Amino acid sequence: MPNGSPAMIQLLIQYLYTGEYSIGQQLEDRDGFDRSIDPDALETHAQLYALSDYYRISHLKERNSMLLKLALEDEATVHRFPGIVKIIYESVPACACALRWKLFEFAVKNIRSLTDGSGDSIQELMEGAPDLVATVISYVVKEKDNLSKELEKSTRRVAELEGDIEDGENMISVTCTCRYRFQVAEPTANIRIGCPRCHRVRKWLWWSLHCRDDSLFA
């Protein structure tokens, strides 16, 4: 069960009676909210989100979901992030929590901030939401592998093109609309090529259709 402390229940009752609740100097209502959310109130919003899910108060749950999503757009939330995650992961079932994807996105985007310093933040996350940490690590590793493969592929292609230029193989003559004639190595993909004189850049397909000369140069 979520945190049902007297203070949280009091806020819940306040909302049910008035359609709003106050945290310190900040007043939250149904119809609109200030974008400058008090960072110290974020865990309270998360607790109310969990309570509203438990008691099936859909409008309050949606309200706090909006507040937390807004907070997750601000990098400064990183200092309160472990506490928010712990509350939501421990109190709201995955099937009923639309916020988990936003929490994942925030963790990936701010992974450096979460792992810098003393390491307290990542330790708190591992204790409060090990599943989230495992998912984030798996995603980051996979992305790193994909980037490494793309870089390796690009490096090989550049080396092949440089070799073709040095050997004079697969060279094609094109004449730009500025009447400047130059040679390029025939690409295997639809890359962009610029004219050395007028600096106009066009896709290779355009050069091939409009400016390619009939002769090939070896």
Image (spheres, rainbow, N blue to C red):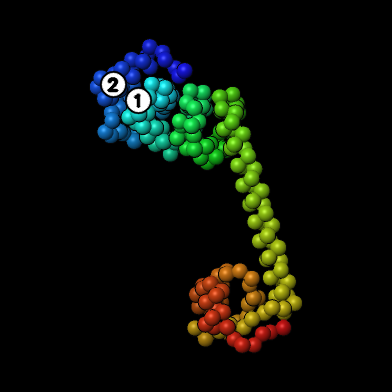
Q: Where does residue 84 sit, x and y in percent of width and height?
A: 47, 27
Q: Residues within 10 Å of mark 1 (few under 14, many from 20)?
A: some
Where disc 2 sits, the SS reads helix
- Measure the alpha-carbon separation of dots 2 and 1: 9 Å
Q: Is residue 68 above or below residue 9?
A: below
Q: Is residue 210 above or below residue 119?
A: below
Q: Is residue 97 left or right of residue 143?
A: left
Q: Residues within 10 Å of mark 2 (few under 14, many from 20)?
A: few
The amino acid pointed to by label 1 is Ile
* Residue found 66% across the figure and 56% down from its top: 151
Viewer-side label of 2, 1: 1
Where disc 1 sits, the SS reads loop
Q: Where does residue 208 sit, x and y in percent of width and height?
A: 56, 79
Which label belongs to residue 57? 1
Q: Quadrant of residue 11?
A: top left
Residue wearing tag 2: 16
Q: Nearer the viewer, residue 49 or 109?
A: 49
Report the number of discs: 2
Name the N-terminal-most of marks 2 and 1.
2
Q: Is residue 185 left or right of residue 10?
A: right
* Residue found 34% across the figure and 21% down from its top: 23
Q: Nearer the viewer, residue 133 or 71?
A: 133
Q: Nearer the viewer, residue 147 or 120?
A: 147
Q: Where does residue 152 sit, x and y in percent of width and height?
A: 69, 57
* Residue found 50% across the figure and 30% down from its top: 94
- Residue at the outermost top position: 6
Which label belongs to residue 160? none
- Residue at the outermost right position: 167
Q: Is residue 185 left or right of residue 1?
A: right
Determine contact: label 2, label 1, CB under 8 Å. Answer: yes
Would residue 21 be visible to someone looking at this image?
yes
